Each structure stands twice: as C-alpha cells, then as structure tokens.
Amino acid sequence: MVGCLLVPSFPLACELAEHRRLVGAPAVVVGDDGVVEAASPAAEARGVHPGQAVREAIGRCPTLAVLESRPAHYLAVWEAIREAVEQTVFTVEPVGPGLVYVAMDELLAWHRSLDAAVQAVLGCAPTALGPRAGVAPTRFTSLLAARRAPAGGVGVVGEDGLAAFVGPEPVEALPVAPEMLRRLRLLGLRTMGDLGALPRSALAAQFGPDGILAWELARGRDRSPLRACRRPPRLTERLSLETPLASRPVLLAAWEQTLGRAARQPAFRGMAARQAGLLAATERGRQWSRTITFKEPLADPRRIWAALRPALEEAQFPGPLSELVVELRGLAPAVGQQLALPSARSALRGRLEEALRQLKARYGYCPVGRVVEVEPWSRVPERRLALIDFDP
Amino acid sequence: MEPGAGAPARAHRLRSLNAPTRVELRAEAGQPRAVLRRARWCRVETVEDVWRVDDGWWRPSPVARTYFRVLLEGGLVLTLYRDDLEGTWWAQRY
C-alpha cells in the first residue's frame, strides 16, 4: 500500500496558517512577477486561478486578499515536514512542496492499525496547513484519495474498489501535459472511466508513451515502486542576532562567523562540502535564500568563504536580518590537497586561535572582539564602528 | 561530581563602540569653554570643527545634536555634542 501526504496549494496553506482570519476568504499568493501562484477555493469560485495576472484577479474579485510570495519560507516549512516524514518511515518519495509518498506497509509493521499509521504520517505536517492523507494500492490512486479527503482527514481505497474509485475522476487529474488534456477533452473523454474503457493500443497510437501511462493510471495499474530518496548529509549552523542588522560589512562578518562555526562542527572534520545553502530571515519573518554550488568539493572554510562572499556582497536582502543560517550540503570525504609550507605568520595565527579557543571554553564566549566598520561615513560617531564577537 | 569545565554558549553579540558618556561642561553662547574630567576643569583651547546632525526625525527617538571637535588644554582631542532636544552635553573619544 502507498500512502500520500498532501498539502494542497502549499504556498497558500503556509500563508493561511499565519493569517487565520483569511481562512475561507478569497485569497491568493502572488509572486514577484505579479502572477498568481496559488488561489483559495473561494477565490477560484470567483474566477481567479493560478497563472493569472494579479490585476486581472483583483478585477474579477475586488475583495481578494493578496499575499506576497515567500519562497524561502515555504521551502523551510516543507523541509521541516519532509524531515519529520523521513523520521517516521524509511521509504519516502518526496515529489515537491506539499506532496510526499510513503510506503504504508513499513508503517503497518510497527503501528497497531492503519488508522494509527495514517495519523503518524498526518502528524508530520502542522495541523494549520490542513494536511490530508490518502492510502491506496498505487501512488496515483493514493493521491486521488488524499485529494478527496477533507483537511486533516484520510481517504482509503482498497484493492477491490479501485476501478470504481478511479472511474468517476476527471481526466484533468492525470499527470500529463496540458496539450494532451486539451486533446482528450476534444475527443470527448471526460473521466478516467471513459479513458480506461478504450483499448490500450488506441491511446498509445494517439499519444505515445503518455497515452499508455494515462490508460494504466485510469485503470489503477500504476505498479511502479516508490523511489526512496535519501537526502545527503548536511550541516546547519544558525546565528540569531539580538539586534537586526542591515549594514553590509557587519552582515558579512556575521555570515563569515556562522560559516566558521558550521565548518568547525565535529561532523565536518575530514569532510568537504559540494554546496552551501544560505538562508536569512528578517524580524518580520521575510526570508531570503541562496544556494551556491562549488566548482569542486571544499573543506577549507576560507575557500568556502571566498566562494560565498561575492554572492553575499551583492545580495538584496528583504530588510534588516535577525537570523542567518548556513547549510553545508553534499558532504563527502575530503581528498588530500597539496598544502603550502607553514609560515611564521600562520603559526602565530594558529597559536592565537588556540588561545582564543581556550578562553571560549573557559567563559562560554570569546571575550575578544573584532572591530568592524558599520557606517564609516556616518556623521554620528558611535555609528561608525562596532565590536563583533571574534569566534575562533 | 565535578562541574563541566566549559560554560554554556551564548547568543552572538554586537556591541557599539565609542558610546557617548554624559559630561559636565561650561558653555558660553552655546560654545563649550571647559570640560570636567577627573574632577578637574579642562579648558577648551580651540574648537576645531562644528557640525549639526538632525536624523531619524521620523522615528520615536529622533537625533538632534550639535557636535564640537575640541582640543583641550594638555593636547587631548575630544568630540563633544549637545543634545538639542534635552539640552544635555555628551563626550566621545573620537
């Protein structure tokens, strides 16, 4: 049996979880390009749909609540859900934000009933997002079951009632190209039942491999196993700032410090990272994120910083930042690298860093600070320089 | 059992430098003439620079200051400012 955890209109669900007064009201999430990304059922009932320009959407529904898209926030919410699912069951196939398939047979082995197993999966997503679950013999039918289920509910389809369950579903539910759906409508095929009643060869002749796939899905014959996807190990380091920072030099120093902390984690010893994820959040919850892939796996924090710095120098943050997150991804054992002969300067620096580490171990923080320029041009003297913790 | 050698880690800090301190001052016609330092009045030899800052007037705590960069007797250079909203005097190292 395949289980499906579904959060429909994921961006909108994330926003409504924080704006509870908009639940049931016409609302949309709009991207930077002014195009609707997700629309609530109330908005769709008034002719608003994803892909529409926001001006047109407001024209159709003057009471529409327009919410600004926060992709980094949605990704963070999705990552948390995905992590929770991965800790609940071994075989997990994430499709994208808001949709993940799991192997229910594994869960049934250590949960007393199907209901308990489904609740374990549903519990991986916050209730406020309105998650729903579907359980069925195939991946596609479990998705259909989840779509039919109410928020927080579950739809279960057994082997016996599979054809009767799939038959009335509209062909629009098929995961095929819009052009194929358009042609199916032109041919007068409205439901899965209509499609499944045709000979397999007829669909293959019309649509090729997509036709065969559609025919098999319409008959509930999708038997491909779940493709378990394990995330490669990653290291995360967070830095919460007491005072939100806007100054670029101070932010650069803070980013560098966070990277240094991540690279000093014991799990990174002897390892190299292929990619770094940078995430920043403002006090008001707006987020910024960037992923930087290195040309070769990097183990030296100074080389990693050299790769990250240009992106951070040019980044347009959404406001003063109160939290910085550095994620080192794609960890692999570091291969040997030819090192330079040690110089007197590096030996001195090594001794200094060791002394500072001792101080940090003693006091819990490093009592030595580093002077950074904040607003060197400012006519208010105390704004020109600041002292930031020097973290060896 | 022996307590752990290390103290728990704490949040990251950003401390401002050159924070202004209140200062006792003798002024004439709005110009500083002498500054009380270590229980002694130090005469202002010269006022090297004067500038005004009006900033953040849209915020709850606006800044309205008149700065004086002064040379005290003995050769010490200080930055003094008068808070034009409260009428108080403050000193800074630079």
Image (cartoon, coloured by chain):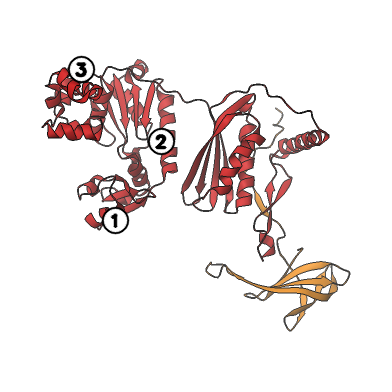
Pinpoint the chain carrying mark 3: A
Q: In this view, does B66 lie above or below A224?
A: below
Q: Is mark 1 on a helix, strand or loop?
A: helix
Question: Label 2: few (<14), some or many (≥20) within 10 Å?
Answer: many
Label 2, on which residue?
A: A78
Q: In this view, does A261 lie above or below A159?
A: below
Residue A92 picture location, percent across and down: 38, 23
Extreme bottom residue here?
Answer: B29
Report the amino acid beneath label 2. Trp
Chain A drawn colour = red
Question: What residue appears at the point 37 percent right and 20 percent down from the top-left corner?
Answer: A227
Residue A31 picture location, percent across and down: 37, 48
Q: What element carries label 2?
A: helix
Question: Which mark sits nearer the N-terminus, 1 or 3?
Answer: 1
Name the side, left or right, on which A54 lies relative to B12: left
Q: Who is closer to the viewer here, A61 or B89?
A: A61
Q: Can residue A164 be seen in this view?
A: yes
Pinpoint the chain carrying mark 1: A
Label 3, on which residue?
A: A159
Chain B drawn colour = orange
Question: What residue appears at the point 62 percent right and 30 percent down from the top-left corner?
Answer: A265
Q: Which of marks 1 and 3 is in front?
A: 1
